[in-house]
């Protein structure tokens, strides 16, 4: 699964789903990142569920029930989002770059 951060460089912004300002404004509603376009708070719980209703794909609850889920993310700036995805139980294995791995070590 893809794990995203609330960054103006997000593919959700690049694809035109959000303006950079709208996307960064999601933080005000408690979001810190997403798993498969489902927004999460810092504890890994779903938030902004009105956006999740638009996603064509698995729900967070369905993802959580899968025994082995590989999460993919790069960049130290996604450490908080990845940590939330792990806390929420959505990822059992993580594929990442060195910068993110080091940032996650600091996050712990």
Image (cartoon, rainbow, N blue to C red):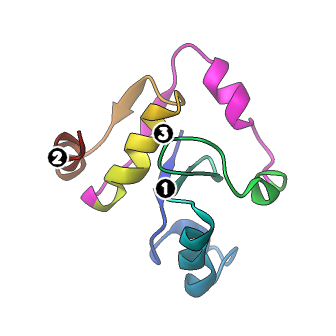
Look at the image and give the residue range highlighted in magenta: 55-76
Q: How many marks?
A: 3
Q: Residue at 68%, 36% (x, y): give it.
A: 60
Q: Is residue 63 above or below residue 103?
A: above
* Residue carrying label 1: 4
In this rendering, would 10 be left or right of 59? left
**Horizontal and vertical percent position of residue 23:** 59, 75
Which one is earlier in the sequence, the residue at label 2 or at label 3? Answer: 3
Depth check: 85 or 28 in front?
A: 28
Which one is earlier in the sequence, the residue at label 1 or at label 3? Answer: 1
Q: Is mark 3 on a helix, strand or loop?
A: helix
**Horizontal and vertical percent position of residue 32:** 49, 59
Q: In this view, does 106 lie above or below 86?
A: below
Which one is earlier in the sequence, the residue at label 2 or at label 1? Answer: 1
In this rendering, would 73 be left or right of 30? left
In this rendering, would 6 be left or right of 45? left
Name the front one of labels 1 and 3: 3
Magenta residue check for 71: yes
Q: Is mark 2 on a helix, strand or loop?
A: helix
Spatial CA distance of label 1 from label 3 is 10 Å
Q: Residue 106: which numbered mark, if any?
A: 2
Magenta residue check for 23: no
Q: Residue at 64%, 53% (x, y): give it.
A: 37
* Residue carrying label 3: 85
Q: Is residue 57 above or below residue 76?
A: above
Q: Residue at 44%, 22% (x, y): give it.
A: 92
In this rendering, would 29 be left or right of 62? left
Mark 2, other Cα within 10 Å: few <14 / some 14–19 / many ≥20: few
Q: Quadrant of the N terminus?
A: top right
Spatial CA distance of label 2 from label 3 is 16 Å
Mark 3, other Cα within 10 Å: few <14 / some 14–19 / many ≥20: many
């Amino acid at each position: 699964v893809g794990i995203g951060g609330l960054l103006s460089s997000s593919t959700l912004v690049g694809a035109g789903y959000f303006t950079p300002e709208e996307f960064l404004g999601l933080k005000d509603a408690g979001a810190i990142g997403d798993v498969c376009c489902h927004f999460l708070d810092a504890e890994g719980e779903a938030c902004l569920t009105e956006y999740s209703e638009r996603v064509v794909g698995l729900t967070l609850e369905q993802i959580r029930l899968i025994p082995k889920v590989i999460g993919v993310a790069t960049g130290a700036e996604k450490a908080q989002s990845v940590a939330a995805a792990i806390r929420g139980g959505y990822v059992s294995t993580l594929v990442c770059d060195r910068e993110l791995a080091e940032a996650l070590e600091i996050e712990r």
